[in-house]
Amino acid sequence: MKMRVINLIKRAAAVVLFAPALALAAGAELHLDRAPVSKDPAALQHGAKLFVNYCLNCHSASFMRYNSLQNIGLTDQLIRDNLMFTGERVGDLMKVAMRPADAKVWFGTAVPDLTLIARQRASEFGSGADWLYTYLRQFYRDETRPSGWNNVVFENVGMPHVLWELQGDQVATVTENADGSKSVQLSLAKPGKMSPAEFDGAVADLVSFLVWLGEPVAEKRKAIGMYVLLFLAGLFVLSYALKKNYWKDIH
């Protein structure tokens, strides 16, 4: 009896220990397209425009203020004229009026805040930018879903395809594989306002903005880090020279 208990404990410990590895192995099967993330201010400004017009209706970016967009080259006046539509002040947080309880009724779940979405997905899939870039381009029509849409990357997602007017309508062809898995092939049934190449570029700009949103000071942090490393390298040289001079009469 005692040995049986010990064996059960060992098996439970093994499950706990290797569960993360198994989860990563399962997640590795998901194919993600490489996101062409840009740091160009024009791309980030276009991404901010798409975010405000298509995402900020439901999703907040509640850790970011409108006037922080000055860091991507926008003035307060440009922000007011192009990115603010409901009487907010330029120093306000980028929040929405929709209540979480209402979102749960309409979409089946509370709508997530997008300030850190790229960093969150990076912790789950290795690259938050690649996940977002693939996800936003993989919606297809599915009349069995309440919203009328489904997604290859996030199956049965509650979010509708808010960019459908730009991309158009995609339909899915599902193939049963020999191993029991399914393959989904998407095709464009009805073109949108943009060509596929233009839409991919627009999504790339939106993803670039979401990446910037998660850490607006990333480039400044990296620049400071380089200066710190150079300072430490110089300090090492001086410290080594001082040590040699201090011990010269002993060694």
Image: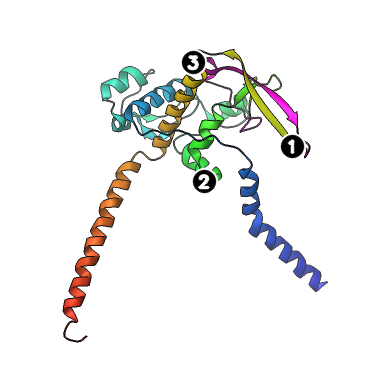
Residue type for callout 2: Ser
Residue designated by label 2 = 123
Label 3 element class: loop
At x 26% / y 61%, what residue is drawn? 232
Answer whether residue 136 is magenta in the image.
no
Q: Residue 208 appears at what percent x and percent y?
A: 42, 32
Query: Is mark 2 in CB contact (under 8 Å) with mark 3?
Result: no
Q: Quadrant of residue 6?
A: bottom right
Q: Closer to the N terminus: mark 1 or mark 2? A: 2
Q: CA distance from mark 3 to mark 1?
A: 33 Å
- Which residues make up the magenta segment? 152-179
Label 1 element class: loop
Q: CA distance from mark 2 to mark 3?
A: 32 Å
Residue designated by label 1 = 181
Q: Is residue 125 above or below residue 89?
A: below
Q: Residue 222 appears at what percent x and percent y?
A: 32, 47
Q: Residue 79 appears at what percent x and percent y?
A: 31, 23
92 or 188: nearer the viewer:
188
As drawn, the label of residue 194 is 3
Q: Closer to the N terminus: mark 2 or mark 3? A: 2
Q: Is residue 12 above or below residue 39?
A: below
At x 41% / y 31%, what residue is drawn? 209
52 or 165: nearer the viewer:
165
Left or right of 159 on screen, residue 233: left
